[in-house]
Image (cartoon, grey):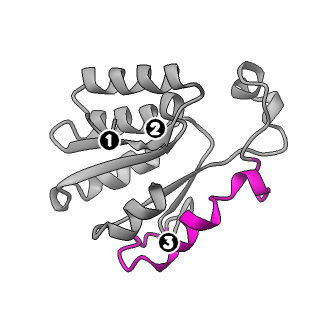
Amino acid sequence: NVAEKIRRHDGDIIVTYDTHFENYMDTQEGKNLPVPHCIEDTTGWSICKDISSVVDRNPNFYYYSDGDIVRSRIYKNTFGSIRLAEVINEYEDEIDEVIFMGVCTDICVVSNALLVKAYCPELKITVDASCCAGTTPENHKAALQTMKMCQINVIGE
C-alpha cells in the first residue's frame, strides 16, 4: 500500500528512519522495549526495497541536507522526530497537507503526527491507516482513535 501511494503521490516526500545503535539495550527505550531493532546499517534498519525504490525514483523526493537530514531521509533515535516537525514548520506556508504512513502506528506514527500538530496546529494532517501497522491490531486502532481526538484526519480504515 505504501509503495503504491508513493507512486501516485505528486508532492514532496520525507522518510524517517528509526535509527538505533549498538548500545540500544543500554538506552531508556531499550530497557523498556528490550527488542533490539533498527540498528544502524543492519537489514532491519533499511526501508524495504519496494518502498525505497519508489521513493528514490519519485521526482518530488524532498531534498534537504543539514547533517541529520540527507536527501529526504531523517535519521531519528526517538519515537517522534523534532527535526521533521521543524522542517515541516519551516515550509508550512507552502504545504497544503501532510500525510503520514508507516510503522509503528502506536509509537512512531502517532508521535510524529502529534509533534507536527503541535508545531503546525493549523496545517491539515492526515494519517492513512491502510499504510500503517501497529504493534498489535488493537494498539493500531487505539493510536488512530487518539489521533482523531487530536484533530488529525484518519483515512483508509
Task: Please indicate, yes or no, whether residue 113 appears anywhere in the rendered image.
Answer: yes
Question: Element at badge 3?
Answer: helix
For marks 2 and 1, the one nearer the N-term is: 2
> Going 17% across and 55% down the picture, which residue do you hit?
96
Q: Which residue type does callout 3 highlight?
A: Val
Binning the other alpha carbons within 10 Å of mark 3 as few (below 14), some (14 to 19) or many (20 upward) gives: some
Q: Which residue type does callout 2 highlight?
A: Val
Q: Which mark is residue 96?
A: none
- Asked if the residue under mark 1 is in contact with the one under mark 2, i.e. CB atoms within 8 Å, the reply is no
Please give the residue where the numbered disc 2 appears in the rendered image.
109
Across and down, in percent, residue 63 comes to 42, 73
Question: Element at badge 1?
Answer: loop
- Asked if the residue under mark 3 is in contact with the one under mark 1, i.e. CB atoms within 8 Å, the reply is no
Please give the residue where the numbered disc 1 appears in the rendered image.
156
Across and down, in percent, residue 91 comes to 25, 59
Q: Which residues are magenta?
A: 39-65
When the figure is inspected, residue 27 is found, relative to residue 53, above or below; the finding is: above
Across and down, in percent, residue 48 comes to 64, 60
Please give the residue where the numbered disc 3 appears in the rendered image.
54
